Amino acid sequence: MLACVRWPAMAQHRPVMSGQPHALWKVVEDAPIPAYALRAVEGDFILESCNAEARLRNPSLVNVLGLPCSQLYRDQPEMREAAERCMREQRTVRQRWSVRRHNQLEATQPQDLVYVWVAPDLIIVYGRDVSSPEEMAAALQESEERYRSVVTSLPDGVVLRGSDERVLTCNDAAVKLFGQRTQGDILGHVDVLAPGCRVETEAEQSVAGEDFPSRRVLRTGAPVAEELYQVCRADGTRTWLLVSAQPVFTRGGAVGGSVTLYKDVTERRRLEQELRQAQRLESIGRLAGGLAHDFNNLLTAMLGSLELVGDTCPPAAREDLETIRHAANRARELTAQLLAFARKQPISLEVVDVGSLVQKVERLLQRLVGPSVELAITAQQGARVRADAAQLEQVLVNLVANARDAMPEGGRIDVRVATALRADQRQWALLEVEDRGVGIAPEILRHVFEPFFSTKVNGTGLGLASSYGVVKQHGGDIDVQTEQGRGTLVRVCLPCVPDPVSGAANVALAPRGRGCILLVDDDENVRATTARLLHSMGYQVLIAGDGAGALELARRHVGEIDVLLCDVAMPGRSGPEVARDVLAVRPETRVLFISGYPQGAESALARHAFLQKPYTRASLGQKLDALRASPAHRDE
């Protein structure tokens, strides 16, 4: 009552009224109404003590004991004047005053303040509410309206239940949360949430009513912290709720009801699941990339050896040789799909008109779907994107093949190309493949982009996974919309480029190699096979198995070293680190990196040429010829 503002906390203590009889202390302490002791000190009054009733009305008083009233009465000078008059005239002074509670939220309350002089330096002040019944009713109504406005404005659902478990009141957020129309659809019911609702766990098992927080609070009288539940609402939709409950006690201390708070975390759960899915795909992608790296090293040795064997193979064995080469090339395609899923497949970017690309492969798609499926293509021209045409073509083939497999009895597949302005105000190219097949079940839909997941008997599970990786690597999005029994729509979105950009001019290729190449690779089979391929093209070859050996050769070799042909991922020093060491000794040497999987070193490769493993003799020769025809580049 005397402290209308919170002051910095002081040490908690019980003041000693020095020089005053102990009975006087008991008068203040045991008064049935608010009572305060003011001590006159050096022309001011010190708040020396206050009883339990005063502290109940204003808990902050315990933190301002010992402060001068000149600070406490800054905005209430009349109260200080009354205390001074009581001290000066040594008589009782009465004062009518309207005070506001310490939290400044409740309405002002009229009080009679009685200042009693008891000693030359001590005054006791009593306070008594004198509100009329009308004023008390108005104050109560104002408090209820204020409480209702606070609860109504909360974004979370609030439900108050009585001791019989019936809903007494709730806010609009709760009505909306439970899928009801008005509060009347909830009030008075004993249901766990609302009529027609069902509470389930994450495993979609119904929760017994007595286990729900609101009923547990009524049974035990203990509050329940936040617990996660899935609610199936009356309209069939599902939502995730964090539920907490607090008991409401009667004056006698019994549990008279409960207040339950419902927080909608459906969107948060969705984002968490997407994050977990992305992390799982990223982990699988790293595994797939690592497998592709090792397998590409094997394929490099196999394909290179097949080419060398083909130079001397007798005609009778060439058919078997071609069978082996075909199988190895098929394995190379599978590793390319793994790398596409891992988003580590090197891409050759050029401006591609998506509509023209679809028309170009129309005959291939017709043969792919077969006679029982109608293929309808609507390709808008001008949907130009910067992409690797071969990889984009593979994405289209994968989507059409999946659409065909979804219609075993035949049907119609629509392939559409268009452009659209999305929310980011950028123009995007849309490639859509829609079938009228069986659709995808919800429990399968969340796995369709995972590698090695397939519902087909002979499926590899890499089609959609690699398509997802290719689209993401091109800066685009891929989305699946499906309805069981009615079909599936897969939409690929890629950012458009405004104008065609001409590609680099073709470089004239020399028929035979010449010069010296420093070959660095930690895989012995790759080193041996690549060296033989280079020798067969006419190059002089220096061979090293690691960075230290490469640097030693670069220092000792007497003649020129035209090209450093270096693997990217090696134990010890990586390819880019080896290149920096060699260029420090041989600044005019050109660099060609080779790798089955760069493993995150793409940024270091941007300044040099790159060739993906496994490579053929022709692709290796073309890359070297083009590199030697270009000006030498020195790292800064």
Image: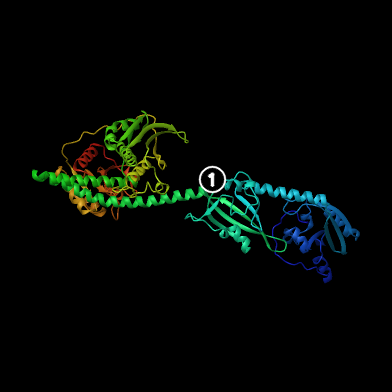
Residue at 55% across / 57% down in the picture?
227
Q: Secondary structure at mark 1?
A: loop
Farthest front residue in view: 409
| Position in image of residue 586 (x %, y %) | 25, 46
Residue 528, above or below 45: above
Residue at 43% across / 32% down in the picture?
420
Q: Say which residue label 1 marks.
A: 235
- In the image, what residue type sits under mark 1? Asp
| Position in image of residue 377 (x %, y %) | 34, 31
Q: Is residue 14 visible?
A: yes
How did the renderer colour the structure? Answer: rainbow
Local packing at callout 1 (Cα closer than 10 Å; few below 14, some 14-19, many 20+) is: few
Asked where in the image residue 57 lies, by quadrant, the reply is bottom right
Residue 497, above or below 253: above
Asked where in the image residue 83 lies, by quadrant, the reply is bottom right
438 vs 45, left or right, is: left
Residue in front for this viewpoint, 12 or 51:
51
Q: Quadrant of the N terminus?
A: bottom right
| Position in image of residue 372 (x %, y %) | 29, 36
Number of numbered discs visible in the structure rendering = 1
Residue in front for this viewpoint, 382 or 611:
382
Q: Quadrant of the C terminus?
A: top left
Residue in front for this viewpoint, 455 or 6:
455
229 vs 398, left or right, is: right
Q: Is residue 636 visible?
A: no
268 vs 351, left or right, is: right
